[in-house]
Amino acid sequence: MPGPIASKRPVLYTVVCAAPPARRIDEFVRQAQGLGWSVRIVLTPTATEWLDIPALAEVSDHPLLIRPREPDEPRTAPADAIVVAPATFNTLNKWAAGINDNAALGVLNESIGLRLPVVAAPYAKATLTAHPAFERSIRALADCGVTVLPTNAIQPAPSGTDAPTWQPVLAALPNLPV
Ligand SMILES: Cc1cc2nc3c(=O)[nH]c(=O)nc-3n(C[C@H](O)[C@H](O)[C@H](O)COP(=O)(O)O)c2cc1C
């Protein structure tokens, strides 16, 4: 059963943005836990509106991160690695530009300075990815060491179900720290 900060497993912050695969993020979390990660779910403000917060709190090994820390609030378990999946056009562009106006962006922006392993799984339709800011953002983040997966690598599994296959994201995770 998930328990706050009880485990010594490496911590994977899973940043979730407001795109359709977010509704199945619980499946990704369980698969990452199966690989040995202790997962902390981090939500953008819009993803927070979309998703079932009590249900995600049950799945997350650590308290959900959905708003910036208050000045007197203690720090929580730091991340060993970070995934942002699905990564929206909006969050990718804000991250690349260094905008820091929500908790998810705070995690992502600091990940660069902390030199943490980060995997981003962009998910957006062609009418958004055609905007020149998108390619610039992807390139800037990759230049900073972020592993940026091909856009829309998260797709429904071929079995005919509508469940996204998280396999490309899981495969891109760093080796578990020893
Ligand atoms: C039904 C629906 C589907 C959407 N799908 C996507 C998507 O696949 N990719 C994307 O970048 N934005 C998508 N959006 C737009 C984002 O939700 C919107 O830009 C939002 O501000 C993103 O916020 P966030 O980046 O803070 O999560 C969608 C919006 C709606 C209402």
Image (spheres, rainbow, N blue to C red):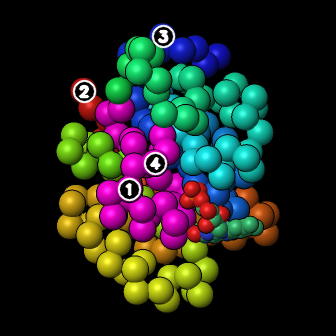
Residue span colored magenta: 79-107
Most foreground residue, 10 or 4 = 4
Q: Which mark is residue 6?
A: 3
| Residue that badge 2 annotates | 178
**First of labels 4, 2 by sequence position:** 4
Residue type at numbered disc 4: Asp
Q: Nearer the viewer, mark 2 or mark 3?
A: 3
Q: Are marks 2 and 1 in contact (CB under 8 Å)?
A: no
Mark 2 closeness class: few <14, some 14–19, many ≥20 residues within 10 Å: few
Residue type at numbered disc 1: Ile
Q: Are marks 4 and 2 in contact (CB under 8 Å)?
A: no
Most foreground residue, 136 or 116 = 136
**First of labels 3, 4 by sequence position:** 3
In whole angstroms, how far apart are the C-alphas of marks 3 and 4?
Answer: 30 Å
**First of labels 1, 3 by sequence position:** 3
In whole angstroms, how far apart are the C-alphas of marks 4 and 1?
Answer: 6 Å
Specify whether residue 71 is in view: yes
Residue type at numbered disc 2: Val
Mark 1 closeness class: few <14, some 14–19, many ≥20 residues within 10 Å: few
Q: Are marks 2 and 3 in contact (CB under 8 Å)?
A: no
Instruction: State ligand 1's quadrant.
Output: bottom right
Q: Which mark is residue 164?
A: none
| Residue that badge 1 annotates | 99
Give percent across and percent down for residue 113.
Answer: 20, 45
Q: Nearer the viewer, mark 2 or mark 1?
A: 1
Give percent across and percent down for residue 152.
Answer: 54, 72
**First of labels 2, 1 by sequence position:** 1
